[in-house]
Amino acid sequence: MKTIFRDKNFITLQDWSKEEIDTLLEVSFDLKKKFALGVDTPYLKNKTAMLMFFEQSTRTRNSMEAGLAQLGGHANFLDTSTMQVSHGEVAKDTAIILSRYGHMIACRYCDWGIGNEYLNNLAKWSTAPVLSLQDDLYHPMQGIADLMTIIEKREIIKNLKVSIIWAYATSHKKPISVPVTQSLLFPRYGMDVTLAYPEGYELPDWVVEQARKNAEKQGGSFKITNDMEVAYTDADVVIPKNWGSWVNDQSDEIIDDELESYKDWKCSEKMLAKADDNVIYMHALPADRGNEVEDSVIDGPHSIVYDEAENRLHTAKAVMALTMGGK
Ligand code: CP
């Protein structure tokens, strides 16, 4: 078991060894149990975190703020539209100053081609750990909560059939960071992952290459299909979710003819019936109800979306406890 995490950045789980992720999961389960029992966990007493948000959030912001309070520390919520970064202050200056005031900088910045680079720039200059709250490429906070949830619901995860499936949505042009993170992470735990999307919604080639390498190392598999039915058939876990066509089209336009031609990529009861009888339906939320998924599915007996969202709290606390405190 790895024990030394202090000041480690959390920008992509690819930078965390499997042993380190195993520790993160163990700490998450321990914190969850203590939360259930009402046991105090003041591991980060008098510690302060700076949470920078360039975009909206419900789960990420509140799991971090509530989580740090429960660990005895304090989180400063920073709406970047009210910070000097909106007047052009560079990442270097922001990182040096904020890390002198507190013990961690976390940031959500999902602009395509900009977000991940900005976070890495913060990390280069910060003297405190930098945590991702989602960028254009990765959402490690979501990935680790999803992994914890799958382990809870399906004890044996080796060769579990997990399908990450593109779904139609019109709410906004969503980042690719959730499917990228899941595609890279789940094969590291030996799962048999199928990634399904209609033409035009590819993930970057390097993601597919790395996901296949991760699968090979752990005895899992990583397959791609353009056929939604193939992905649903006999799946143990389905994760139908929209992402934008960022790899092929960098415009901010939400709705175009290509998107409209894939309206049938919806998680319906009919599709779910093709999966294993005990299939679990997951979604990082927010869901575009009626487009990505039928209400009867997300509110139905196979859905575990609220347990999945709750685990964002326990895993966020584990990430903070290990990187801001500990040894
Ligand atoms: N899943 C997720 O990151 O939710 P928020 O956008 O509400 O933070």
Image (cartoon, grey):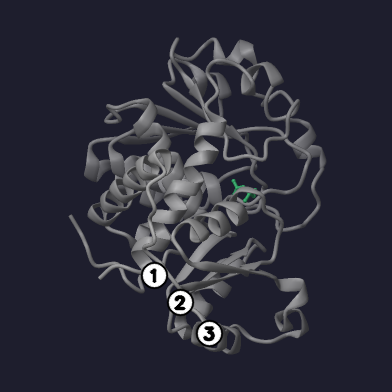
Real-space CA distance between mark 1 and mark 2, rounded to the nearest whole angstrom: 6 Å
Q: Identify the residue at image location x=48%, y=15%.
A: 275
- x%, y% of residue 24? 32, 52
- x%, y% of residue 98? 56, 83
- x%, y% of residue 81? 77, 72
Q: Decide: marks 1, 2 in contact (CB < 8 A)?
A: yes
- x%, y% of residue 165? 55, 32
Real-space CA distance between mark 3 and mark 1, rounded to the nearest whole angstrom: 14 Å
* Element at label 1: helix
The C terminus sits in image quarter: bottom left
Which image quarter: residue 226? top right
First-in-chain label (1 vs 2)? 2
Which image quarter: residue 113? bottom right
- Of the residues shown, which amino acid type is indicated by label 1? Met
**Residue under label 1:** 324
Q: Identify the residue at image location x=54%, y=47%.
A: 178
The N terminus sits in image quarter: bottom left
Q: Is residue 192 visible?
A: no
**Residue under label 2:** 103
Is 76 in front, or is 146?
76
Horizontal side of residue 168 vs 30, given as left or right: right
First-in-chain label (3 vs 1)? 3
**Residue under label 3:** 101
* Element at label 3: helix
Question: In the rendered image of this protein, does residue 301 appear above or below residue 99?
Answer: above
